[in-house]
Image (cartoon, rainbow, N blue to C red):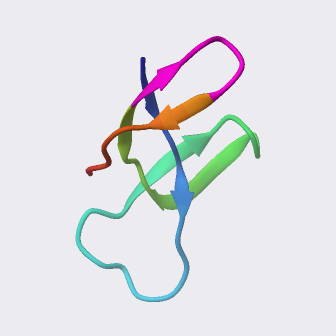
Amino acid sequence: MIDDATLEKVGEKPEGIAWLHSSTLGKEVLALNPVVPGWTDGEVYIPVSFWF
């Protein structure tokens, strides 16, 4: 399974930060958007790697 996340940031705008829509908050946020591949059995999700 491959999942993505929205990691909201505040302060200076480092490289890789962009305005993204957060479905959890229902608004645009300044954030990183990493992709996280992982293993799941339908109940538990275990990340196996992490990158931007």
Residue at point 74% right, 40% down?
24
In the rendered image, the quadrant that contains the N terminus is top left
**Residue 39, quarter of picture:** top left
Relative side of 6 to 27, left or right: left
Q: Nearer the viewer, residue 32 or 19?
A: 32
- Residue furthest to the bottom in view is 12
- Residue furthest to the top in view is 42
Residue at point 69% right, 46% down?
27
Q: Is residue 14 above or below residue 49?
A: below
Q: Is residue 25 above or below residue 17?
A: above
Q: Nearer the viewer, residue 32 or 12?
A: 32
Task: Confirm whether the magenta stretch covers residue 41.
Answer: yes
Q: Nearer the viewer, residue 8 or 19?
A: 8
Residue at point 23% right, 72% down?
15
Q: Is residue 31 above or below residue 25?
A: below
Relative side of 32 to 30, left or right: left
Query: Which x, y percent locates residue 21?
Result: 57, 41
- Residue furthest to the right in view is 25
Query: Which x, y percent locates residue 14?
Result: 30, 78
Query: Which residues are the magenta region?
Result: 38-44
Relative side of 36 to 27, left or right: left
Query: Which x, y percent locates residue 49?
Result: 30, 43
Residue at point 60% right, 13% down?
41
Q: Is residue 45 above or below residue 31?
A: above
Query: Which x, y percent locates residue 20?
Result: 49, 47
